[in-house]
Amino acid sequence: MTDKTAGQGPPEQPPVVSIARLAEHVDKTVRLRGWLYNQRGSKKLNFLELRDGTGVVQCIAFKGDLTEELWETSGAVTQESSLDVVGQVRAHPKKPGVFEIGVEHITVIGKSDDYPISPKDHGTDFLMDHRHLWLRSRRQHSIIRIRHAIIQAIRTFFDSREFTLVDAPIFTPNACEGTSTLFETDYHGQPAFLTQSGQLYMEAASAAFGKAYCFGPTFRAEKSKTRRHLAEFWMVEPEVAFMDLDGDMQLAEDFLCAIASHVLETRIDELEQLGRDTSKLEAIRAPFPRITYHEAIEILQKAGHDAKPGDDFGGDEETVISSEFDRPVIVHRYPAALKAFYMKKDPENPELALCMDVLAPEGYGEIIGGGQREDSLETLVSAIERHSLPMPAFEWFLDLRRYGTFPHAGFGLGIERTVAWLCGLPHVRETIPFPRMLSRLSP
Ligand code: 4AD
Ligand code: MG
């Protein structure tokens, strides 16, 4: 099959194909368009590694097959020049599934002089400043392809369970996750905040659709520089009517297993390219251990941490707790005082919230936060007062408790932390195409 979207050349030109589909064209002459990834040459042969976004293929220019001019062109192409190459597809003599191109014609579409990223080691700041070019490298390509597969798995999972996608707004009049990380903007003369979470809107959506989810960018003015925090990150947030905390934990477990198995099924080459130990991903199977907040405190104390009941967990604590397990661990029932205003209290101990965090293994820490929501109008009103939140901004949210209130629960999964974990990356900055962090707004 030819790639119709890439457009066709003049009638005498062979079809434009993608590198990923070369297997369908063995022994035929095809046309490829892409960029020069790498090059080496000898007296009679030039080896050009061409990448087109779907893969990388070695194009072999043999002096004896080419005119003087084409031979010279093949030897003078510089890194990241864009090229149009016509040649015959040959199966690699020794490696099954690998193909080569015997170059018949080569045209430089756009020359690239002094490409700033060379195969040598560059510092992270340099690479981050050149993120727009760095995305072309094999490692970044693998990460973003795995991110794509994760998102694909998320959509398929919710589709197969009768969820409706309900997009939440980006401009919001109120805080969802505390007022300390709000990005304020001017909305036609009135203050507005970039959304921290679509949850409150998904609560409305769950009353309309039963099962709903949103998936979009969320924003937090995090003041700390850590390997887990971005100012702009993508979150997927399911919300389900008539589901309790147990159902929420079950949903999170099924969801993460589905994501991990889809990534293993569809992105094994990329995982290998990143040097990921895939046995760690194969271990992501149900059942996930479920421990209470107090059991988590005991784990910390046994590990020599001076944690005491009532303390919140930061990255260090999560690393210690999650390192005890070979698969994600669900920590539930944190002290209500540590959690957001909308959390329902545990009827068996009102000091605790019916909430849960899922901590990823290998020290990755929290990837999911969620729980059961307060469904009593009176209790929610007092919680909003106690948190000193502006009541008028929450009137619409209170309506959900006025008109047919219902038990419901949900959670939010951070995409970038999930990508970091599944790819085995030490920092979230490479998990999103263009990261926004405390000290980075460009490119
Ligand atoms: O635990 P959080 O704050 O939960 C909520 O926002 C709920 N309203 C979600 C819900 O119940 N619908 O955030 C959820 C997840 C975290 O577990 C983490 O994976 C990710 O969002 N996250 C971040 N990821 C990157 N950078 C940040 N600054 C993040 N803050 C949260
Ligand atoms: Mg959280």
Image (cartoon, helix red, strand yellow):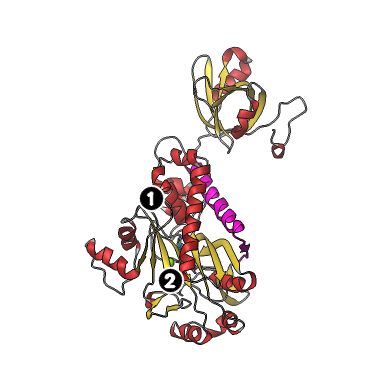
Q: Nearer the viewer, residue 200 or 107?
A: 200
**Label 2 crowding class (10 Å Cα cut-off): few <14, some 14-19, many 20+?**
many
Tell me, yes or no, if residue 385 can be seen here: yes
Furthest-right residue in view? Answer: 11
Secondary structure of the residue carrying numbered label 1: loop
Give the extent of the magenta segment. Answer: 140-169
Specify the quadrant of the image occupied by residue 237: bottom right
Beta carbon at label 2 within 8 Å of ligand 1? no
Label the magenta part by its dominant secondary structure. Answer: helix
Amino acid beneath label 1? Pro
Furthest-top residue in view? Answer: 64
**Label 1 crowding class (10 Å Cα cut-off): few <14, some 14-19, many 20+?**
few
Beta carbon at label 1 within 8 Å of ligand 1? no
210 to 10, vertically: above or below: below
Quarter of the image containing the N terminus? top right
390 to 416, vertically: above or below: below
Q: Does residue 292 appear to the left or right of 26 in the view shown? A: left
* Dot label at residue 370: none
Q: Does residue 65 appear to the left or right of 335 in the view shown? A: right
Q: Nearer the viewer, residue 61 or 258?
A: 258
* Dot label at residue 426: 1
Counting from the top left corner in percent of width and height, residue 243 is at 52, 70
- Whether the residues at callouts 1 and 2 have beta carbons within 8 Å, the answer is no
Counting from the top left corner in percent of width and height, residue 176 is at 50, 73
Q: What whole-number distance in Å separates the C-alpha atoms at marks 1 and 2?
A: 27 Å
Counting from the top left corner in percent of width and height, residue 345 is at 43, 79
391 to 172, vertically: above or below: below
Amino acid beneath label 2? Cys
User: Dot 2 corresponds to which residue?
Assistant: 355
Counting from the top left corner in percent of width and height, residue 95 is at 50, 24
332 to 125, vertically: above or below: below
